[in-house]
Amino acid sequence: MGIKGLAKFVGDHGEILTDYRFRNSKVVIDGCNIYHSLYLTSCVDQQHGGEYDAFQDQVCKFFKALRDCSIEPYVIIDGGSDHTDKKFETVRKRAESKIDTANKLSKGLRGAWLIPTLARQVFKEVLSSLKVPFAQALSEADQEIASLAQKWKCPVLSNDNDFYIFDIQAGFLPMSHFKWQNASVQRWSPENYIPCKLYTTTSFCRLVNINRQLLPVFGVIAGNDYVNLDKMGFPIRWKDNSPMEPNWKRGEIPERFPSSLLLKWLTSFQEKQEALDNVHLLIGHGENNMDAALQALSQGIETYQIQPGCLERFFNDGEAPDPGLLPDHLSVLPDWTLLPLTKGTLPPYMIYILQLRPVIQGIQVEDHSLPSGNITSRPIRQVFYGLLLGEGREVEEYDREGKNLTSSKVKAILPSAAQLLQLDTLDQVLRLEVFLVTVGVSQSIFKGLPPQLGLPVAVTYYWLRHAHPRPDRPLLQALLLGLVAANDSSPSCVSGFIEEGLVLERMRGLIQRPAMSPDLGVAHVFSQWNRCMRDGLYLNQLLCLPLPEPQCACPAATQLIQPSVVSLLESRLYKGTLVHQLVDQLRGGVTPDSLLMEDPSSVQLYRTTGQPDGPSTDSGAGGRRGC
């Protein structure tokens, strides 16, 4: 996430950031950064696999605040990543850190942060429900975000401190200073605004007395996600090896900043090339190849040069990026994938697969003495890989093994239904057949189910057969009860509020404050279900949705954007603390029918999801089939 200490340095110096009343403007939003921020600031539980209803509520309130102030948001989400894999080491280190974080959360430790498996999917579906324009970039989003903001002469909203380096004309709004919850709002007033801080490169460079052209040089020498001279064997050495504060143009600043000496050094130059021609004086003391370091620096500087983007025509006209204008490394993408990838209806990690690059699997709270939950859904991914690459090719996956990150080769598998056909020519019947064969179910399981429950129930059948340890009856019952309650008679909109169904309201009434640390056995099995759901969703998307996607947001959610409406959205996929504590209730002797309040439609739907030829598990007390 950019340069260490830079965001704090900027925040500590009031003359860099300007108080700003933001309204009546477009804004380009760094989608991945913002959904991470909204999830982590919504104060929801992070130990039970996801609290998506509270997250959706937070997302909806955020975009309502923007529209109340006549702010037009355009969200861009990361798609692929750096095709040269210069950032891979950074990504790998982050995955290792997430393993440590997940381990701490599993022990009940607070202050650790982890985004749950389906947060990205939920975020995209809420954006769609609220009719917020968004696009999924075909590579990292930073360049597209900066390019679109420059084109439209509007600011960028993010917490990524790389945007302190991009020379964006209309500036950068750090999310940490964006007080959307304190918006000044009066009904129908054109003067509503969100109090925030505005950053411009001009204000920063005025303080530190360097030319704006030198900011990218500062960014790459200081070290970002792409270039780390110290790890390359080129640590910076100053002549006297002593710490020193820069003599700032506007007076001496006492606070420490790791890159203060570098900023002082850059005051001696006017042009980028002049600084690069002298960088050997800082790093030329080693025995390593100086040419390699200079090449890395030059390439790193290019990442901060704002280039023409390819998303403006998508936002304006709904058209896919022009294949002829895409960089060479994206030529592996078939033309038919470009529009659905940009619309976010195809999973972005297929770009990694087609580029034959390694894939790092997500990390969640689970029992680290057991194999990773991602192994449970590996057969689904193997079919995903086979559809993209063909039979027998291998994909390198990085995943948790114990408390370490290790790699393995996963072989692609192509189902017989798709053996002789290209993915874009498969008809709808064959697409559905490929999905059903992969998860091992027949169409009969959908009888009596609402369309939006078909995919979750099919995935649950798969999970029940592949999960290890094998889920017991209360685990399955809790999961199915959660799905049924979330689909309870379609929540209604009354006086501007989206009201929960009575069954879900009843279940919530049974839930006490969650324990400090989760039951790891329960957490591990539900973690496996989340991975199966994620990979099932991705396979369904790659097959162009032979099954309807499960609803993550209430259909009435579009009403929530009106000024008079208070937002409350309801997750329909998974409610972590709810299903965990339903397990406790069921193991304590409470029956599913009583939890469903004997509501006939809910009881019938619950029994349909647990029909005898559907999910079943043996109980330790009798081994009956069904639920």
Image: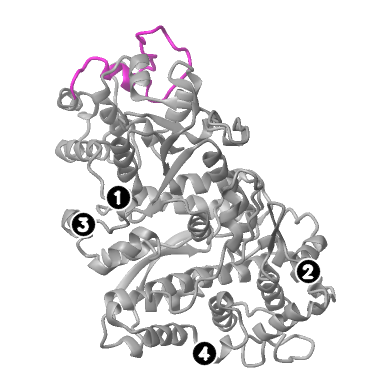
Q: Amino acid at mark 4?
A: Gln
User: Which of pointers 4 and 1 lies earlier in the amino acid sequence?
Assistant: 1
Alpha carbon of mark 1 to alpha carbon of mark 2: how far? 49 Å
Alpha carbon of mark 3 to alpha carbon of mark 1: how far? 10 Å
**Range of the magenta residues?**
242-271
Q: Which mark is residue 322?
A: 3
From this view, report whether residue 601 is shown above or below residue 140: below
- In this view, which residue lies farthest toward the top? 251
The residue shown at (62%, 51%) is 57
Which residue bears the numbered disc 4? 443
The residue shown at (52%, 40%) is 66
Mark 2 or 4, closer to the camera = 4
Q: Say whether residue 333 is visible.
A: yes
Label 2: which secondary element: helix
From this view, report whether residue 543 is shown above or below residue 316: below
In the rendered image, which quarter is residue 28 located in?
top left
Which one is in front, 60 or 307? 60
* Residue 270 percent coordinates (x, y): 20, 18
